[in-house]
Amino acid sequence: MGITKLYDIEQVPPIGKAIPLSFQHVFAMFGATILVPLLTKLDPSVTLFCSGLGTLLFHLITKGKVPAYLGSSFAFIAPIIAASKAYGAQGALTGMMAAGIVYAIVFAIIAVAGLDWIPRVLPPVVVGPVVMIIGLSLTPVAIQEAQKGLVTAFITAGIVVVFSIFARGFLKVIPILLGTVGGYIAAVVQGQVNFDAINQASWLALPKLSFVTGHLPAFTWGAVSLIAPIAIATIVEDVGHLLVIGDTVERDLMRKPGLHKVLLGNGAATFVGGFLGGVPLTTYGENIGVLAITRVFSARVIQGAAVIAILLSFVQKFGAAIQTIPEPVLGGITIILYGMIAAVGLRNLVENRVSLANNRNLIIVSVIFTLGVGGIALNFGQYSFQGVGPAAIIGILLNLLLPNDKAEDASV
């Protein structure tokens, strides 16, 4: 027996219902989407603009068949921070654009070869540890931010925990947003917020896109080597999200419109976002939760949320208010989020019953952990390949080269 659908993907709710339904998706994606540029020292208004534009581009490429919203990807935080420090923000933008090209390459491979090779190249024994080290590599940033105001950080984290565990309905979908608001209020009470930026900002202004400010991307191979390989992890994330959306809406989206078109849409959105000064984008689990709760699957509702995000990016006082969020609030949020990223990787191993009693699996996981957490850098002449990327690629190679003794799995 099928689920009850209030509005299917192709259906369009009346405008009086569509607008609040779209705002609901904005609320769901908002906290996480603006958090990434705050942590990477990029402009939240530009990121908000790019998330809306990227979502519309994604829907254009997938022909409105996948009701997904694209927001900032947490997987890229550490490499963006590292690339920005080493090569400047303009260099980091080229790394983000290169991540979009990686998506396009995988799109081309799937379009020609189909989907059967994906489980062989990216099995759980590789994906799980890679996702875990993405989270673990970010933990020093969370602690550094939190220690600048531990009371505020703990209040913020506590609100997230309470709403995540005890809330019901829509409130359970937006604990990050609620934690940010609650932590901000606590910071205001303690005198930790400076409102000067809000007072000085005008009401309406063009977002500080790269071509507006003149700070266009500047190609740097080092930044590309740091950021682009992370697309491997986010492609895996897209696969998981597409399967969940397909189960929610009761359609085989892997085949129609097809994973390759979803990856092309995400890659195009990431490339354009990098060019304009935003951050890499990914399909958002928060908005998938909204689909499941509301049973409103209309693509037009998601597209409406994208338009609202673009319009909000033009309100300069709104963008200035976001930038006044103090570091302890961000620290409280990221204590939860970065640990959750690592936990998701662990869950991937557990749910897929990856046996670490199998020496082959144990070696693959161990090598990925050591190289990833240790931050290995591979140097090829003047070029350097650093971060999670080398660990992921070496893990993939080990998985392809080491023999799989299934008898060993059966014996444990």
Image (tube, rainbow, N blue to C red):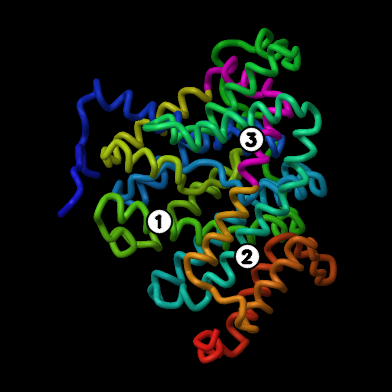
Q: Is residue 254 above or below residue 57?
A: below
Q: Quadrant of the C terminus?
A: bottom right
The residue singled out by tag 1 in the image is 262
Which numbered disc covers residue 129?
Answer: 2
Q: Is residue 195 above or below residue 342?
A: above
Mark 2 to mark 3 CA distance (whole Å): 23 Å
Q: Find out whether the residues at labels 1 and 3 contact each other: C-beta distance under 8 Å.
A: no
Front in this rendered view, residue 238 or 63: 238
Q: Residue at x 35, y 29 (%)?
A: 22
Start-end of magenta stretch: 314-338
Q: Magenta part mainly helix, strand or loop?
A: helix
Q: Find out whether the residues at labels 2 and 3 contact each other: C-beta distance under 8 Å.
A: no
Q: Position of residue 276 (x, y in %)?
A: 59, 39
Q: Specify the amino acid type for callout 1.
A: Val
Mark 1 to mark 3 CA distance (whole Å): 29 Å
Q: Is residue 48 visible?
A: no
Q: Specify the amino acid type for callout 2.
A: Pro
Crowd tier of the residue under label 2, counting other residues whose Cα lies within 10 Å: few below 14, some 14–19, many 20 or above: many
Q: Is residue 212 visible?
A: yes
Q: Is residue 210 left or right of residue 122?
A: right
- Pair 2/1: label in front: 2
The secondary element bearing badge 2 is classed as: helix
Q: Is residue 234 above or below residue 338?
A: below
The residue singled out by tag 3 in the image is 333
The secondary element bearing badge 3 is classed as: helix
Q: Is residue 189 left or right of residue 403?
A: right
